[in-house]
Amino acid sequence: MSLRRKVLWSVLLVSLVATSAVPVPAQQVTLLAEGSPQHFVAAYYLNEFQDHVPVRFQVDSVTGRWQPVRLATTHPLWLQWSNGLDQYTVYARPGDTLYVQTHPRQPLYYSFHARSRAGVHQAELAFFNRLKQQGLGLGLPDAMGLFVNARYPLQLPRLRAKRDQRLALLHRYHDSLPLSAAFFTFARQQIQAQYLAALLGPYYDPAGGYTELPGSYSRVVEAAEPAAFLTSDTLVQTSQVYRACAVGYVRYRGRAALGTADELTTLYQLACTLLRGKTRDYVLFALLKQQVGKLLPSFSTYSARFQGDCATPAYRQYLDSVCRRPTLLAQLPALLNTSLRRAPTGDTLTWRQLVANNRGRVVYLDLWASWCGPCLAEMPASAQLQTQLRGQPVQFVYVSLDRDSVKWRQALRAQQLVRPNTQHYLLAPDSPLATFLQVPPIPRYVLLDQQGQAVSLDAARPRDPLLLTDLAHLFP
């Protein structure tokens, strides 16, 4: 069902709180959702700083239809559309106007077309959905098993075959339909980046699962030539998978130092040596961003060095803003006055009151939801951690982002989360506090010291051994 001409337009400005590093964009991507407002439209992208930016569609109160959304950007956006665990992707360029159609009764939930009738553009918009129709979609990681075991001889042929099938389909598509040279290059690079991300994925595992991989695995990684691939100043802006590959490659090369006190030093020096251009600048930025608030003695040294090593002003300015964010959490009125609902009483209190009520104790804040599998997977480790820290001045606070309070309460009972020394609250996912904390995605963990000041807005997970070290620094 197409939008009527008289639909009222509104502007949704997607921006990061306290980010002065992003220049004023010259163009926009306009999204027009077609279909019943009863069928939820959900989308997001990861910006050039690898932050999750939700795309929020609102229903017009007069027409009852989805309002247009305009995304300001200077470069193409790799948009991810979701339907539960299913992911759909579309490559949107500055200046595009895209129509998004929902198909709730069909296996392919979304389709995309452009205002322009140009065949090239229509073919490009359809390509990634065509991959999905063939069972070759790029929406989800390919290497889930590599995170938990060493069955790589079984999985590597599947990963290579999937990459080759995607590339073959791209070439057939290009032969029969008009694709621009720029899009063909991007699609080919994105397919290769997905393959590399699968190979390098285990080196993100905080539990150290990569240590189970045999020595021959490094030959597989090197044969994929990640160093030669990671040289694109363009992809580092557009592709979240490329950015993940760049950091993953440095983690792979510095794998012996992962989880040690020398991790930041080793990875920073490797990034300077192995990479160049904006790819190197991004990785240096990402390494430091991940360590903000982790109480590493080397952080101040390398954050100062970063100002001279990084040639991209946006990364330097954004890192400064990230370092200021923990302070803003205790200062901005919109955050302090955000309401949360308390379990089991159902009454509300503000973020300011929650922090004040727990002053004198270290607060470990767990942002989760009943529908989040990874969140629930961390709960046993969280319970074990509470037992281990019994007698210490630490308070475990669980904040759910469920939109349905009934499902929230059901999850509290089913997961047996209401235990001594726990507090439970419900937070609206579109509230100022949730937006500031950039959740979802979840799980996310926040650490407050005994004075109520944020130490980390991205603290270690309960099962991460480094969390105990971080907490010990905060105890008297």
Image (cartoon, helix red, strand yellow):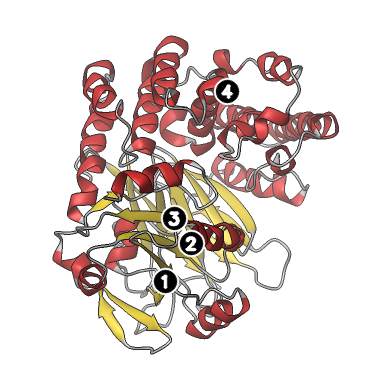
Crowdedness near tag 2: few (<14), some (14–19) or many (≥20) residues, C-alpha within 10 Å: many
Choose the circle earlier in sequence order: 1 or 3: 1
Residue at position x 18%, y 54% in the image: 328
Sequence-wise, which precedes: disc 1 or disc 2? 2
Q: Name the one closer to the observer, 328 or 94.
A: 328
**Along the horizontal axis of the image, is 19 left or right of 430?**
left
In this view, the mark in front (3 or 2)? 2
Disc ID at residue 444: 3
Mark 1 or mark 4: whose residue is earlier in sequence: 4
Residue 239 position within the rendered picture, expressed as x and y whole percent measured from the top left? 49, 35
Q: Secondary structure at mark 3?
A: strand
Find disc 1 in the rendering and name its residue: 421
Instruction: Check whether the beta carbons of the residues at disc 1 and disc 3 lie within 8 A of each other.
Output: no
- Which mark is nearer the camera, 1 or 4? 1
Whether residue 246 is visible to the viewer of this picture, yes or no, is yes
Q: Please give the residue where the numbered disc 2 appears in the rendered image.
A: 386
Classify mark 3: residues with Cα within 10 Å, few (<14), some (14-19) or many (20+).
many
Number of other residues with Cα within 10 Å of mark 1, as a class: few under 14, some 14 to 19, many 20 or more: few
Residue at (55, 30) in percent of width and height? 186
Q: Amino acid at mark 2?
A: Gln
Q: Quadrant of residue 153?
A: top right
Q: Which mark is residue 330?
A: none
Q: Quadrant of residue 334?
A: bottom left
Figure check: 389 above or below 10:
above
* Count of number-bearing discs: 4
Q: Earlier in the sequence, mark 4 or mark 2?
A: 4
Rounded to the nearest angstrom, the CA distance separating label 1 from label 2 is: 8 Å
Which element type, helix, strand or loop, lies under badge 1? Answer: loop
**Quadrant (top left, top right, bottom left, bottom right) of the N terminus:** bottom right
Element type where label 4 sits in the image: helix
Label 4: which residue? 252
- Which amino acid type is marked by label 1? Asn
